[in-house]
Amino acid sequence: MSLGRRAADMTVAGRNRPETRPRDASMSLLNNLFSQSLEPGYAQAAARRRSTGEQDGGDRTVRSRVSVALVIGMLALGLLLAMAIVQAQGSVGVVSAEREGLIERIRGEEAKTERLQDSLASLRSEISELEDTQLRQTSTGQSLRERLQLLQGAAGTSAVAGPGIAVVLDDAEDIEAAERPDLARVLDVDLQMVANGLWAAGAEAISINGERLTTMSAIRMANNIIHINQQPLKPPYAVWAIGDSRTLPSRFSEGPGGDTLRVAQQQGVRSAVRVEEWLELPAARSQLIYARHAEEAS
């Protein structure tokens, strides 16, 4: 009986004893994932951030202050730039006004100079008529008159007329399309060589666009504008030369003047030479620079 009872007790004890191993022991990995959503490293980092929350707040305050200072600095810089632009525009307006005023003054002086030149030409004409009237009264005076006319014609101080040739030079039709745009326009050296070539060919008097050439004439270029006797000229340039119309054209073409035209034509410069039966050249505008009346010199 005791042995059976013991077996019965063991059976009952074994039935009522709790199980020592969980049923989901094989699912420990899934349990860990659900119970711990973060890796240990992330959890530790989050804990550190929580522990240093006060310090992070201080950093955010510093960053906020820096941002405000940056905004204020940008606004100040924009204000300075705006003031600089306004000041620059005002300066440009002042400079433009001064430039316009200077241009008006220059135009006024040019008009005044033209009036004085016209007055000078009129006075010269009156003087010439008085001289002719006085010199014609005697044979000696007539001889002096003829000599004076020759000297005035050679010096360019009196108008002259007679047969000769006309040499016309003009810039290329399309300067920018030329291989050398700087050489596709008429230069001061071209007019200098043409004038010298006409003198060498036997010309007695020369004018360019109505400006009489004398020993004191200057042909120069400034700001791409050719000046003769300090007068600005525009193309085309008509070079008139009085001389023997039978020999002057050929001698000019065979000399340095003709060579200059041929070289310029290769760069696109247009030119033409024609014989003229009658040309009228005005007196020169230039005056003596160093000569003074004796009373003024003393």
Image (cartoon, rainbow, N blue to C red):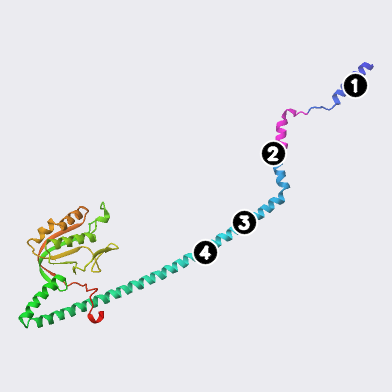
What's drawn in magenta, residue-wise?
A: 22-36
Identity of the residue drawn at 62% across and 56% down: 66
Q: Residues within 10 Å of mark 3 (few under 14, many from 20)?
A: few
**Label located before the other in sequence (1 or 3):** 1
* Viewer-side residue, 61 vs 181: 181
Identify which amino acid the numbered label 4 is placed on.
Leu
First of labels 3, 4 by sequence position: 3
Q: Which residue is mark 2?
A: 41
Between 112 and 215, the residue placed more toward the observer is: 215
Vertical arrangement, residue 223 with respect to residue 156, above or below = above
Disc 1 and disc 2: Cα gap in Å? 52 Å
Label 1 sits on residue: 9
Indicate which label's residue lies in the foreground, 1 or 2.
2
Q: Name which residue type carries label 1.
A: Asp
- Real-space CA distance between mark 1 and mark 3, rounded to the nearest whole angstrom: 82 Å
Looking at the picture, how far across and down is residue 5, in whole percent? 92, 19
* Residue for badge 4: 80
Residue at screen point 14% across, 57% down: 255
* Residue linked to disc 3: 66
Along the line of sight, the residue nearer the viewer: 279 or 230: 230
Residue type highlighted by circle 2: Gly
Mark-to-mark CA distance, 3 and 4: 21 Å
